[in-house]
Amino acid sequence: MVKIMAEKKHKKETKAKEKVSPKQIAERIKKSAEIMVKQIEKQEDPEFTTMQRGKSNVVWDEKKGYLALGDKEIKRTFLNIAHARKFMQTTLIMQKTQDYLLNNKTASIREIYYELKHTIKGTKENTFEGQDESDPIIVDLEHSVDTIREKLNLHANPKGTLYGNITLKDKMHNNDKFNASKLGRGGWSIMSRIEPEEIELLETDAEYLLVCETEAMFERLIEEGYPKPNKCLLIGTGGQAARGARRLIHRIHEELDLPVYVFTDGDPYGWYIYSVIKQGSMALAAHSEFMSVPDAKYIGMTLDDVKNYELENVTEHMKEGDVKRAKEMMAYPWFQNKEWQDQLKKAITQKIRIEQQALANKKLDFVATHYLPEKIRNNEFLP
Amino acid sequence: MSAEKTKKETKIKNNDDEKAYVIKKAAENLEKEFKEHSVAEFFKKNKQMLGLYGKVRTLTMIIHEYVSNSLDACEETGILPDIDVKIDELGEEYYEVTVKDNGPGISRENVGKAFGKLLAGTKFHRLKQSRGQQGIGCSGCTMLSQMTTGKPSKIITGQQGKKPISLELTIDPSKNEPKIEEIKEIEKEFRGTAVAAKFKGVLYRDSDQGALEYLRRTAIANPHAKISFRDPLGQKIVFNRTQTVLPELAGEIKPHPKGVTVDDVIFMGKKTGARTTLSFLTNEFDRMGAKGLNELKQMVDFDLIKDPKQLDWSEAEQIIKAFKKIDFIAPTTDSLRPIGEKQIQGSLENIVKPEFLTVMTRKPTVYAGGYPFQVEIAIAYGGGAGRKVGEETKMEIMRFANRVPLLFDQGNCALTKAIQSVDWKRYDIKDPDTSPVTIFINFISVHIPYTGAGKQAIADEEEVLEEVRLALMQTGRKAGIYIAHKRRESENQQKRLMFYKYIPEICSALSQITKANEEKLKKNMEQMVLTKLKIEDEKNAEMQKQAEKALRNDENSVVIKEKKPKTEKKEQHNTKRKK
């Protein structure tokens, strides 16, 4: 009972965060700047406050089922040799994002870097020497005003593809309505910024969403005509899922109430892709509530598949780095369940991995005709 | 050298039976040859041994001879030296050197001896702190000039109350006798000596080992002298005197028993007026007391009544052996004449113009048991200190022996080795090779332990190395405190610049976001930076005060010299400009 209440309350909070308008975000930035101005007028060292990131401030929220950021704050002040330059850069990013928000402009993180880069008067120094200087400041600002990059009207490079019978509306482009199964075999390129005020999810007849690690498997399933008869939406992430893809997976799950199944290579790298989709990443722990899908399930590949589907002769040898990674993952709190400990142990002892494409060893269409349908029918998932 | 050569030739030529005869013959020839050789001819054939190698080096050595001669002459007669040096380029590797002083002048009788007779100086076999232990003397220059150009040296000299004379002088190498020609009286008031001589096979370079650097350093070590120089391009440089008091003349001292050789004992015995060895030893040696003599009596197998003129080698050897065993009091050191801390400070400030300077004259001490010596150290930092190489400033080492600059053989010198043995990082000189530092070391002794005939490097005597090292560390500590202070100060300056440059960017951004007044923001931020840095400056000053206090309690013999007002002024100026 208590748990349900808590979940409801949490959903409400998330909804509130989701619904925050660009104007409101701009207002938050302005407030933060006004505090600095006041400090300066009082001859106090102006401060910028944001959340500390990285492992030391990431906590595993077991109740919510995702990684979350702890409450450690960091303050960046101007009168500090180590901070002064970053402080200056922060004010520039604040000003520019506020400008985007008020003028309904969006920009890639590369574009904002170029827009702000210039030589500081009287010096040979640039405001930003490279994008690697501006990117972390953007993340700082996201955390400082408690939102995600996308709501600062900023986006990273797009990556990932959507296919299947789902109708979307692009509000930023003549309110175009389109169906992701009618765009040819290539599907729809997921933009890096797909906030509800831009892209609306209208309707679908699908019963689940299948997330695929490799583009090759994504293409195979389309060629085999898998999505339509199986009432499935397909997202190819092309390796680790980008922010846009994660946000879309999250939204499809939340807004359309579809279960999410993740299909990756059977190795620590693939399993971690699943983990990020399900529980969030350490780097973006603060954004987990916008992006994670704690209900997601893992469909394969597992090391048990090797035996069950007689794939022994198409396994690959695991590299030392993979073994090390598996050991690390075994220690993560969000991998503390019997099934995953079992998988990781097998990986470490057998030192083998199995790729999605290895299923082609049976037959090209084996994955579409047998592997996936059987697993789904038998409810054969890892948590 | 020629003996070896002859031997070699004979070896090649001869069969066994002829051998004995030929060797005998060669030996006879050699002997004959030696008899005919005068000192002058020896010089002619052994220039290298006298340090006259290298085109640049030779020209510098020539300048050294004339200038030392002038300085000595002036000091000995109580005149503040005014020395003019000119170098004119006459052709390729062909120069004329002119050196003029305001000294006492030389009489007609002595001028030949001074400029035209090798090894005729008065400086041999006397134990006295002097410049003249090095080199070839003025006569050597006369010799070199006529050897390379065939021309005589021109000399004008005038004494007080007498008419000046001009003359041309050469040396007859086989007789080692001066040859004077064209002698004339001049109808002009002049006191002093001017010499002009031409040299071929030499080269003028404005380098670390060139004549200009030699004169610059000479001026530093002789603050009572005014030295002007005109280089071959006609550029004139004047090093003004910063002292109007002449240095006290160094006294002649008796040798200490631990500082003499068998040969010295025989030579001194021949010269002495004493009639017994006993009185000879008592009168002619330093620290020779009754106790020492009694001990010595027990150690030699001859009677000390013996006439010292009759001492033979083995007897002299017994005396030396006894000297080594007997405990004598360390030698008298009051004969040493340092330049003085104040004097060094004055000339370094005048010529090097550093930001900071610390000078120290150490107490005299003794090396090898019998030779008194003393060192003077100065560390100059910032400003004109250091050696400019292109854009960089490197550490400059100025070595002196009895005020004479040592420009060559730096790597071989004990003074350099002492510098290298110090861990300069401890004194905030992070990389001594690339820091704006000038280290001045004057080594003073009645007997400088040179490494070779070139006399440009001091030998690694243990006590010398240790004493110089100690002195460097003591002065280094002072310099370190200043440099650390300076570094903190400059860090503060950099901090201000760094904060300042970001202010316009920040204020522009903040005022765009909040519509706050940009100019007002700027002023406030700048004020904030100044307040913060002022607090740090105060902290820095307090740290400096504490460090200086600690040092004063630590040792009170050292004087710290710092031009505080100058740096303060500079800072105020900068602040104003920034505002």
Image: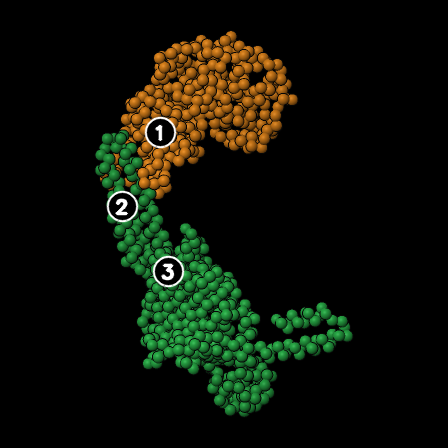
Which residue position is annotated with label 1?
A: A115
Q: Where does the N terminus of chain A fall, quadrant-wise?
A: top left
Quarter-wise, where is residue A152 in the image? Answer: top left
Q: Is residue B28 left or right of residue B364?
A: right
Q: Where A375 sits versus A78, above or below?
A: above
Q: Secondary structure at mark 2?
A: helix
Q: Are marks 1 and 3 in contact (CB under 8 Å)?
A: no
Q: Which chain is orange?
A: A
Q: Residues within 10 Å of mark 2 (few under 14, many from 20)?
A: few
Quarter-wise, where is residue A356 in the image? Answer: top right
Q: Secondary structure at mark 1?
A: helix
Q: Where B369 sits versus A92, above or below?
A: below
Q: Secondary structure at mark 3?
A: loop
Between the residue at mark 2 and the residue at mark 3, the CA separation in whole angstroms equals 39 Å
Q: Where B561 sits versus A142, above or below?
A: below
The x, y position of residue B222, in whole percent, is 38, 69
Q: Are marks 2 and 1 in contact (CB under 8 Å)?
A: no
Q: Is residue A291 left or right of residue A341?
A: left
Seen at 56% across and 88% down, the residue is B310
Which chain is mark 3 on?
B
Q: Where A289 sits versus B240, above or below?
A: above
Q: Which chain is green?
A: B
Seen at 35% across and 49% down, the residue is B491
Which numbered circle lies on residue B578? 2
Q: Nearer the viewer, mark 2 or mark 3?
A: 3
Seen at 26% across and 40% down, the residue is B525
The x, y position of residue A28, in whole percent, is 29, 27
Q: Amino acid at mark 1?
A: Glu
- How many numbered tags mark residues here? 3
Q: Amino acid at mark 2?
A: Lys
Quarter-wise, where is residue A195 in the image? Answer: top left
Which residue position is annotated with label 3?
A: B235
